[in-house]
């Protein structure tokens, strides 16, 4: 199960590189464990190995039942005799042998036959990474990182219940780990192969010719996985939108509709260069998404299809995001669901100013798919190209704000007027005439607040019986989508009592702001 994404030039790069890499695998000399591969110059003056170091060695990070196989380990029937106190009489009778324990016996070590994770893979990776940076010199990272090939299993283990010329299965497992400059893990690629079987004589013939051939095939399969991940591990800079046409830097926002479903989470990162460097993070879940389009993104076939599903509660939310800035979307099943998707459903693209998008995490035909579509004014859609989400970026941004936010707007009703002030921002207050002609202006204020998840409203009215065009419109809006804008409704008397004023004394905006800021967040109920 994987993310369906339009073809990119990275697939062409893979095709170009695989052929020469095969020859490299066949002829590459052995490299000593835990040593960096030789340097390779790019077409420019920089040496990419100053930034990307390729190492190899045993996988000692996890506790194993056997020592990591840096060199070939052979487990024979004689080694298996220790698995039972009755010895071979029981082991080779009609009982099933203990294959799991057998695979982890110490056996004997053939020092001259190193694991491909120690020899072939680092050398092929050197050619691959060097070729990639010649192809994309702008992808050379500014910070140092490491590609480490860690050997775990490289063993020939006898099969079946017979001593006489048994078959031996070649077991291999290793990992490619990309680590940041501080040593933290950014990416891990697992390589596992355990299908090739032959007699021990066949494996050893002609100086282990069959084993060496298998090592080359295993290397190419593992490196093929690395080729597919290289563009995400060392991404090229995103093509920026030309924003020069927008006077004074007033770039129109983009809008995005995110569908939600039970047991699944779709995460939106705004203004995001990678998963660890972004402006805002929004986790859209079934229980926190609204049931109505808040921003007016045109209806699409996906939306209409979900609306027509029987016995299903439609759940989605729409957000305003910075135009001309990169977005990252990720989708996954919730841990408690017991389900998972193979691989990572994630993609990054630059949202065009003034454009609409929708994102859908779909599971169909035993496949997970993350659909990202651009929505046009007539409701038609175009698949949005997205590149793999970078695993490493510079990370120079200031600390980010994590959803749910704690923004608050104070709305003060006085006869004939509505005053609005952001309690957590240094913005000028807004005043509307409290009549039907201001309804559109109020809707714009509420849509903007709705696009900032977690924003709450503190609403102050002259009294419980107060009614006006804007007050009644606000009440209807909050009741329609209570989970989007949690609100607290207060009467002027509640603010006057603590300050010793008469219950019917006028309340100004400064007093309302001070009182609303003192109220704990938990008091704001989603009615």
Image (cartoon, grey):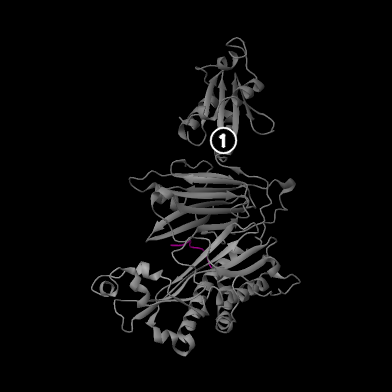
Q: Nearer the viewer, residue 328 or 309?
A: 328
Q: Residue at x 41, y 68 (%)?
A: 104
Q: Is residue 159 left or right of residue 106?
A: left
Measured from the top left, where is residue 343 in percent x and y?
A: 47, 61
Q: Is residue 379 visible?
A: no
Outermost residue, bottom side: 206
Identify whether 253 is placed above or below 13.
above
Q: Residue at x 69, y 31 (%)?
A: 428
Q: Main secondary structure of the magenta part?
A: loop
Image position, residue 287 (x, y; %): 44, 41
Q: Is residue 6 magenta?
A: yes
Magenta stretch encompasses residue 365: no
| Nearer the observer, 48 or 506 | 48
The residue singled out by tag 1 in the image is 455
Rendering coords of residue 496 (x, y %):
60, 14
Residue pictured at 66% horizontal, 61% vertical: 237
Q: Is residue 133 visible?
A: yes
């Amino acid at each position: 199960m994987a993310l369906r994404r339009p073809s990119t030039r990275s697939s062409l790069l893979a095709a170009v590189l695989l052929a020469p890499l095969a020859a490299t695998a066949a002829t590459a000399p052995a490299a000593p464990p835990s040593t960096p591969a030789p340097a390779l110059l790019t077409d420019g003056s920089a040496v990419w190995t100053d930034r990307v170091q390729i190492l190899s060695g045993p996988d000692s990070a996890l506790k194993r039942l056997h020592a990591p196989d840096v060199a070939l380990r052979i487990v024979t029937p004689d080694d298996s005799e220790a698995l039972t106190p009755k010895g071979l009489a029981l082991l080779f009778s009609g009982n099933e042998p203990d294959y799991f324990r057998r695979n982890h016996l110490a056996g004997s070590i053939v020092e001259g036959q190193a694991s491909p994770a120690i020899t072939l893979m680092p050398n092929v990776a050197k050619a691959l990474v060097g070729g990639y940076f010649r192809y994309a010199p702008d992808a050379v990272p500014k910070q140092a990182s490491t590609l480490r090939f860690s050997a775990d299993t490289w063993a020939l283990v006898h099969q079946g219940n017979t001593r006489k010329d048994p078959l031996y299965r070649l077991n291999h497992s290793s990992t490619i780990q990309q680590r940041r400059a501080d040593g933290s893990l950014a990416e891990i690629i697992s390589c596992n192969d355990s299908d090739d079987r032959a007699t021990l004589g066949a494996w050893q013939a002609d100086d282990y010719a069959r084993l060496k051939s298998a090592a080359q095939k295993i290397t190419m399969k593992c490196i093929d996985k690395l080729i597919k991940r290289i563009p995400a591990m060392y991404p090229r800079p995103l093509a920026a939108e030309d924003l020069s046409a927008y006077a004074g830097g007033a770039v129109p926002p983009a809008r995005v509709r995110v569908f939600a479903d039970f047991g699944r989470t779709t995460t939106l990162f705004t203004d995001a260069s990678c998963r660890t460097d972004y402006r805002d993070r929004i986790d859209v879940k079934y229980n926190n998404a609204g049931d109505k389009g808040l921003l007016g993104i045109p209806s699409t076939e996906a939306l209409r299809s979900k609306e027509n599903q029987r016995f299903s509660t439609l759940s989605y939310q729409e957000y305003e995001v910075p135009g001309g800035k990169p977005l990252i979307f990720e989708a996954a099943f919730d841990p408690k669901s017991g389900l998972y998707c193979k691989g990572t459903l994630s993609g990054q693209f630059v949202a065009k100013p003034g454009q609409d998008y929708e994102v859908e995490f779909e599971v169909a035909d035993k496949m997970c798919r993350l659909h990202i579509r651009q929505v046009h004014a007539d409701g038609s859609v175009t698949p949005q190209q997205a590149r793999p989400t970078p695993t490493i970026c510079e990370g120079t941004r200031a600390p980010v704000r994590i959803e749910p936010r704690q923004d608050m707007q104070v709305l003060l009703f006085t006869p004939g007027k509505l005053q609005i002030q952001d309690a957590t921002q240094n913005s000028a207050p807004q005043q509307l005439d409290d009549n039907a002609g201001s309804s559109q202006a109020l809707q714009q204020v509420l849509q903007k607040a709705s696009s900032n998840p977690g924003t709450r409203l503190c609403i102050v009215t002259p009294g419980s019986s107060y009614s006006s065009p804007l007050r009644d419109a606000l009440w209807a809006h909050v009741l329609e989508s209570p989970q989007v804008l949690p609100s607290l409704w207060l009467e002027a008397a509640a603010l006057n009592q603590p300050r010793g004023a008469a219950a019917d004394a006028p309340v100004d905006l400064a007093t309302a702001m001070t009182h609303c800021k003192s109220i704990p967040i938990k008091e704001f109920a989603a009615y």
